[in-house]
Image (cartoon, rainbow, N blue to C red):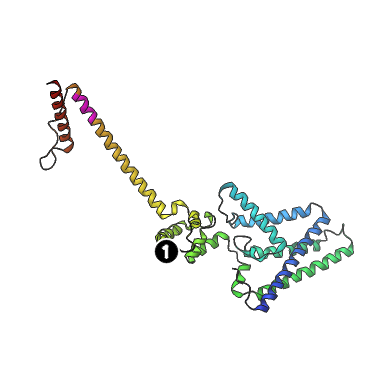
Amino acid sequence: FYGYVPDDGGKRALLFFTLILQSAVQVLIKALVVVILGTIESWYPLYYILGDISLFLLYKIVTRDFRYWIRIDGIPGLCLSLLNRTIVKLVADFAAIVQFRHPYEVGGLYFLVNMCLPVLWLTILLALDLANENLSEGTLKLLTSLGICLGISLIVLLGAFYLLINKEYRHTFYSSLTGPQMTRRNFLEGTDVVKADALTVHKSFWSPIKDEVAGWLNDNWTTWVDEKPDWFTDQWKSMVPEDMIPRKRFKDEDSEEQADEDEETKAVSARQQVRRKSLLEQAITGDFDIRKDAKVAPGGRMKTEIIDEEVFIREIKRNRSLKFA
């Protein structure tokens, strides 16, 4: 994505010079549109800027790319997304920073559209002569000439820029790929390092492939614990949802099994306590009710619990006899 600058020194210098001129021309065109609108009505520049931002936000909503990649959920996350999208749009308008073509920011396609839209608005304003009542004829001719020159210059600079950059990166300047789409593509096609990076953004970016992510974690977690790759840090592990960490999931399952065993043990213990309490009451009152018809275990022996009861009762009787002797 960031390798569009050629290695050749001459081309690189020319490319940087083109970028500087391109940014300057875009800022001039944007400023010219604002000035002309301001001569028509003082509030029009504000309406123009707000409308331009709203158009960008609408584009992000329609393409399901409104949420910013930062890992913050709920209303705070949406508010932060709105703030970040607005700031990035304004910076892209008046600085034309090419890094903002990244799918996580403006996106390649809208970055190109964003550079061409001021030329379109300027053309419409000059063609309709909307400012002819507030500006002199000479000023209008000057603005018209300046607008034409700036528009042609921007087109020429864009063409030169596309010719100078490395061919394999040209598509990044008009790609419609969104942030979530890029995240899912990188995970499905990338190495473990690339896959790991996909989990550092908001979970909504990769949630449609949650099963693939869980499978990848489950298959490789033990290996990472043993080999400890550079990216397998405590910070990265803290970004993985707890229910998707294999050791955490197994621990939870073991805890559930242990809880079931504990409940069963408690139930057995409670039954034994009730039985012993009943035997003790019988011993105190002298009313023994030994079950002679107890079932016989395999091998002709009495069940352990019945034998234990009889032994217990005999011991109580013996002690009573010794006491009153």
Q: Is residue 265 left or right of residue 169?
A: left
Q: Foreground residue, 97 or 135?
A: 97
Residue 163: x, y in percent? 66, 76
Q: Secondary structure at mark 1?
A: helix
Q: Nearer the viewer, residue 221 or 118?
A: 221
Looking at the rendered structure, the number of numbered marks drawn on it comes to: 1
Residue count near mark 1 (Cα–Cα under 10 Å), binned few <14, some 14–19, many ≥20: few
- Magenta span: predominant SS is helix
Q: Position of residue 198 (x, y in %)?
A: 52, 60
Q: Position of residue 151 (x, y in %)?
A: 76, 68
Task: Residue at 64% x, 52% y: name it.
Answer: 82
Picture quadrant where residue 110 is located: bottom right
Does residue 282 appear to the left or right of 119 in the view shown?
left
Q: Give the quarter of the image for residue 108.
A: bottom right
- The residue closer to the viewer here, 196 or 50, is 196
- Of 88 and 9, nearer the camera is 9
Relative to 123, does residue 272 appear above or below in the rendering?
Answer: above
Q: Quadrant of the C terminus?
A: top left
Which amino acid does the dot numbered 1 rest on? Glu
Residue shown at the point (72%, 69%) measured from the top left: 20
Report which quarter residue 312 is drawn in. top left
Instruction: Give the position of the N terminus as an image quadrant.
Output: bottom right
Q: Is residue 219 magenta?
A: no
Residue 299 is situated, as x and y percent measured from the top left of the image, at: 10, 43
Question: Pointer 1: what residue?
Answer: 227
In the rendered view, tell whether residue 310 sits above or below residue 211: above
The segment highlighted magenta reads 276-283
Q: Residue at x 44, y 57 (%)?
A: 214
